Amino acid sequence: MSSPSHSSVLIVGAGIFGSSTAYHLSKTHPDPSSITVVDRTPSPPSPAASTDINKIIRADYTSRFYMDLAYEAIEAWNTWPELKEHYHRTGWIMLDEEGSDIAERIRENFRERGEDPTSDVNLKELGKRWKGILSSTDAQGYRSAYWNPLAGWCDAADATASLMKAAVGRGAKYECGDVERLVLLKNGKGVKGVTMKNGKTYTADQIVLATGAWTSQVLSATEDELDIADADRVEQQIKAFGVCVAHFKMNETELTELEEMPVVVYGGIGEALPPPRQNSLLKYTNANTFTNTITTSSGHQITVPPDRDQRIVSEKLKKETRDLIISKVMPQYSRDRTPEYWRLCWDAATPTQDQLITRHPHEHLGNLILAVGGSGHSYKFLPLIGQYVANVVNGVSSGEEKDAAWAWKTGKEKPGRGAHEKVFPKRELRDLEDKEGEKGDTASWLIPDFEFWTWPETNVGSVSDVRRKAIVLETSNRKPGDPSSDDNTIWQNKVPKLLWCDATMGVPLRDALVRATARKAWADVKGLDWHNETSVQQDIKSMHEHCRYKLLAHTEGNSYSGLLKYLQQCQSVVISHAQEWVTHYSHLMRPSGQN
């Protein structure tokens, strides 16, 4: 193997740990092209916890260790060119529940540092600040609140992608695909690399697992192969956990009202985050966590996110989230409204909520480095965390305190209250799923699929109508009897640009497409707002008008996209990600190209 600082590195996972590690390694590695990152989707990877519309940035910790680290991270958020445009210092208000000492312990840490930015907020005067947006917030059961003007939030998906873009710009490689399993070296002295579900294999001298909530799933087959005892498996170090999140679309008037909105922490129950201008989504998080335990084919129990769309949320969990926080915090912005979308957001937690940044202790996994265990509070460390992972890669200590905090735990450590209390899951997702007869069946109807016939939106007709119009449009420049006027003429007469025109709906992949093509001369990409009639009238393109373009982008939404069958009527090239949803016309797509 090469010396650590010159070795090739394979990073599995492109969330905060993976992106930050690639960023830091690419700055110091003599050959950044020997750094490869793999994830199932382009950056930012859509299933990752870090791929979110926003995350909280704060130094408010009951742990002095993490408070000091957070101050260092916030300095980077304020100054780094890659991050500062994505950081919004709005402050936060934390309501402290009766019987809780968390707020006081946080403020005591600030005082011990000699720079306490916090101040008391009278619960009876909540409605007198921040344009009165908190006037309807239910403070029953809370004894006090405090304000910290130094906290804020960031555009999470954009910031993650920004660091990865910088790493790739220096020469690091980014590959897309689903990891099947680790591959061991034949001499039994380490990990060779990973095999992908598409058959590809990626190898490197050192392997970094930044796989978050999917870590036990990725490692399980290797642990079986090495006959690792249950007590020594990674499942004993971290557990996958989820939280339920709801996103409500704000109109222009509401966005103006919420311009000064701080992050609102509703004790240990959850939080509400301000709506970013680019998507106008007010986000509520139910902080009551859960896990999803499965039994592997070898009989071992592991926790892993369910293998389904993260936007599938049970009515029972929706009701819990509404009852606990949506109806309590600024209810005027959610009352009598349906969320734009729900999401189960998954992360991995350690029992102490310390990250796990260390080499695997097994003798046959010495070149396998774990960079996991975000524990629901690590996003703010995006600028820093990769440096500490890089230290492990290079065989350099991060300091006695950090090395101990992020080490593989033996079970002999002194117990404590944890860095992010309450996040470690104590209930199962299956107990929060709808049982038969509990799904509100009176509001659920099976209906025929009429979408081949017509759509009500402006300029959308039946598929047969679009087909006829597309033929007329594409053949209008043909000259009868001229043999040179063929299909090539149709292609040459098309607009040499990429077209996409649809609602983003907060779908990360769609948001990423709009961001990536902004101000690009070769792209005609527009995100529609179906709630804005003017936008629909002005910006929508007739289905057959899509056929004027050489390149047509196709993206799935909350499920399959009904647009695909219309795009298939054009003699154009459809550019699409790997499809997760199969329709009865999906087989008409003829894949071509390296992906």
Image (tube, grey):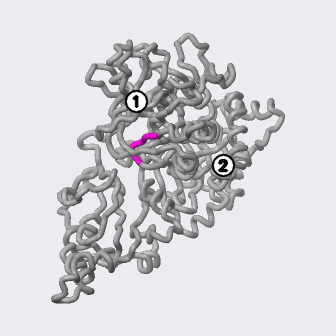
* Residue 287 falls left or right of residue 558: right
Mark 2 surroundings within 10 Å by alpha-carbon count, few (fewer than 14), some (14 through 19), many (20 or more):
many
Q: Position of residue 34 (x, y in %)?
A: 50, 37
| Above-or-below relation of 276 to 171 | below
Cα separation between marks 1 and 2: 39 Å
Q: Nearer the viewer, residue 333 or 109?
A: 109
Q: Which amino acid lies under the numbered mark 2 shown in the image of this protein?
A: Gly
Residue 519 position (above or below residue 298): below
Query: Magenta residues: mostly which secondary structure?
Result: strand
Query: What number is the disc on residue 193?
Result: 1
Q: Nearer the viewer, mark 1 or mark 2?
A: 1
Q: Disc 1 vs disc 2: Cβ atoms closer than 8 Å?
A: no
Residue 252 belongs to magenta span: no
Residue assigned mark 2 = 152
Residue span colored magenta:
37-41
Rendered residue at 52%/63% (across/down) = 250
| Residue at 41% over, 80% down | 537
| Farthest residue, direction right | 114
